[in-house]
Amino acid sequence: MKKYLRWQGAVGFLAVIALFAAFIYLFAGSLIKLSIEKGGSWYLGAEVNLAQASVDWSPVTLTLNKLEVTDANEPEFNLVEFNNAEIKLDVWQYLIGKTIINNLELTGLAFHTKRSSPGKVYLESETDKPSEEDSEDPTSDKELSLPSVEDILAKEELITPEKAKALKTTYQTEQEKLKQIKDTLPNKEALAEYKAKINEITSKKVKTPADLIELKEALDVVKDKIKQDKALVKQAKEQLAESKENIQTAIKELKDAPGQDWDKVKNKYQLDSFEADDIAHILFGEAGREYYGYAEKVYQQLKPLLDKDSQAEDEAPANPELGQFVHFTEQDPLPSWLVKAAQVEILTSQGKLLADIKELNNQHWLRDLPTQVHLASTQKDKAKVRADLTFYKTQDANILSQGDWDVSNLKVSSDKQASKKKFSVQQTNLASSGSYKIEPKQKYSHLTSQIKLNLTDSEFSSSTNSGWQQDVITQLNRKDAIPVKIQLSGKLANPDWEIDSGISQIVKDTMKAKVDDKLDQYKAKLNTKLNEQVQQSLNLNQSDAAELTSVEALLEDTDQAINDLLKAKLKSVTDEKKDELKEKLKNKLKGLF
Amino acid sequence: MITTLVKLFIALNSENSAKQIAYAVALGSIIGLTPLFSLHNLVVLILAFLIRVHLGTFFVSWSLFSLLGVMLTTSFSNLGASLLNLASLNDFWTSLYQITLFKLAHFHHTTTLGSLIISLITFMPITYLSVYLINKYRQHVMAFIMKFKVVQSLKASKFYSVYQSLSGR
């Protein structure tokens, strides 16, 4: 046995272990500081500074002093910082691969604070991207955007001149058609000739049946000619009716054209798209979106942590270089990481807030307990805040969350950036209450939220000198209280915003009077010019209309004359001659018997 | 560093058996290839100190295999992940997971499991290969090298004086 073992080696082993233990005991703080600074910088893409890290070994408590995380988009600001963190760690669980924090106390947590010197950024900044603010402003000044009436008439493809031209063409076309038919109609001479011919036939003496047949044949010839002429008159009447309809349609289109032109101009120059809600959106929607965007940014930073381990048993490790723990079913399962209880002091411009958090983790299904957050303000002279929310992530990565809040005496004042905007709230006293709910719907997380705001002692400002905008600001500043209702609904990442505020009516009243008056004047001016064109076109065609009327009268006269000829003479003449011949025949027969 | 290499050189040329050196290399390979702060490495360290293996060689092997381990971490992690996530082994891992020692040894960590399996599989091949190479060295290379003039001149250098002082000759 002695051949294979050296018992004095145990001393060496113990010496090595003692060396390791001493190294860890002495340098644990420095190693943790280095890990947080290097690991944090690598993960967030910006400089992370930690003033000091120390470890108390009984019970194992990690203390971090003054942590600052640079905002990669604004290196002169911190994304987040805190003064002190005291973390009571479950060492046994840590040794078996789980980070279980029994209690966390965080003081002086603050967001977006100014750094003493700009932090280093290791990722490409997003600040170079053009902001939405620069790209589009729905309140672009209408007064400046109105084109002159003359320019509209000269440059725009308007319907009125086109329809005036169409009316003229219609008149010409229809006149040509009527002229062709008119040439084929029987004139007065022809009608007189028919009359003379009929008189001549009827005055003839009928002595024999042969005379009667001859008379009938002569009459049939005249009758056929008259009937042909009657058919022509009928055709001419139909053409006249069609022409009249075409012309009436063209006139109607011409008369409607100025209205259509106004609609076209109005749409093109967006003269009616300006809604009062736009301003409410600018004032509350943009500010709201800014806060929502900030929350979204924080969420995106935390998302990998939240997503991690949701399906760890089925997937390959996210970072193969570091490896990862794969956990299996156990009797009393614990999440990969868990903060059982935390007290977080948050510093805001509205005073200190205290967040009491329980069960913070991302695998709620394992203990079937949701994360609970209770937020309350601690300074009486500052804003009064109360918020409660719960958060539960299911095994299939769905998020269930709901919460409500009450806020009062929240004093909001704008920064320099806001004052450059077309509309901004310089200062206001804000009260708010609301609730939200996030639940899975189809393939995404669905958010519904109702937010009530009440603004008192507000002061609004505008960076423009435009008349109506200043009027709106004056009216808004006169109001003692402005209630606002905001409703969010839709996908959590990009919900729809509905803003209903008392501000809308104020803006509508002020702006309608100002803008509508301007637009009405403009509309009247443009319509006058267009109607002049219409009238001119209609006047020009009055002589044509008179000609049409004369054609109509002529047709009526001719038709009447032909009808008279047919009814009065032709119908009875053969019968009369027949009767006359019959009488003669009877007389002759009387003489024989 | 020179001292450590000299120790290895001494070991190769000493009366130590080839097996003592070979096992030192193999044990060093386990601690070098697997994550340092693992429970099984405590066992490896105890063995290295208690069993009569050449400690100098053990530390040199540990250093050299650590470099190799860094390069192969991704492969070890992938191997461990594929084994731990294998559906057919799920019951096996789940039953082991109920044992605290299993979790304490971090066998449910992808890199630890992957690297430990590889280092255990290669343990005996490394041992036999080392024995073979040491014997070959002693039989042929050492005798051959000693004939060179450069070796003769080295005997007069600082390196040789350190060698002599450490070997006790």
Image (cartoon, coloured by chain):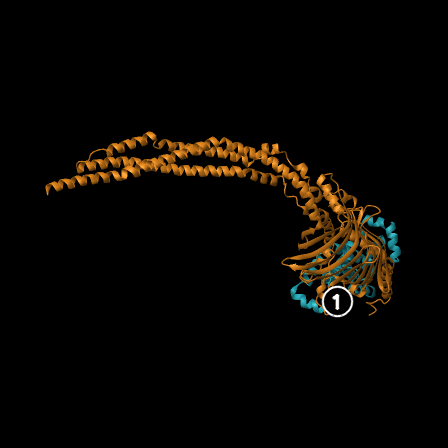
Chain colours: A orange, B cyan
Left or right? Give the position of A526 relative to A375: left
What residue is disc 1 on? B102
Q: Is residue A58 above or below residue A212?
A: below
Q: Which is nearer the eye, A386 or A221? A: A221
Which corner quadrant holds the C terminus of chain B? bottom right
Extreme residue toward the left, this view: A593
Task: Name the image quarter holding residue A433.
Answer: bottom right
Q: Give the SS element for disc 1.
A: helix
Q: Is residue A557 above or below residue A436?
A: above
Count of numbered tags: 1
Crowd class of label 1 (few under 14; some 14 to 19; many from 20; radius 10 Å) = some
Percent from the top left, x then y, of residue A354?
81, 59
Left or right? Give the position of A214 relative to A434: left
Q: Residue at x 32, y 29 (%)?
A: A189
Q: Which is nearer the eye, A228 or B102? A: A228
Percent from the top left, x then y, of residue A22?
87, 60
Q: Amino acid at mark 1?
A: Phe
Q: Residue at x 84, y 50 (%)?
A: B152
Task: Name the subunit of mark 1.
Answer: B
Q: Which is nearer the eye, B123 or A380? A: A380
Percent from the top left, x then y, of residue A194?
29, 32
Extreme residue toward the top, this view: A189
Residue A337 can be seen, yes or no: no
Percent from the top left, x then y, of residue A509?
68, 45
Residue B96 can be seen, yes or no: yes
Q: Residue at x 52, y 32 (%)?
A: A537
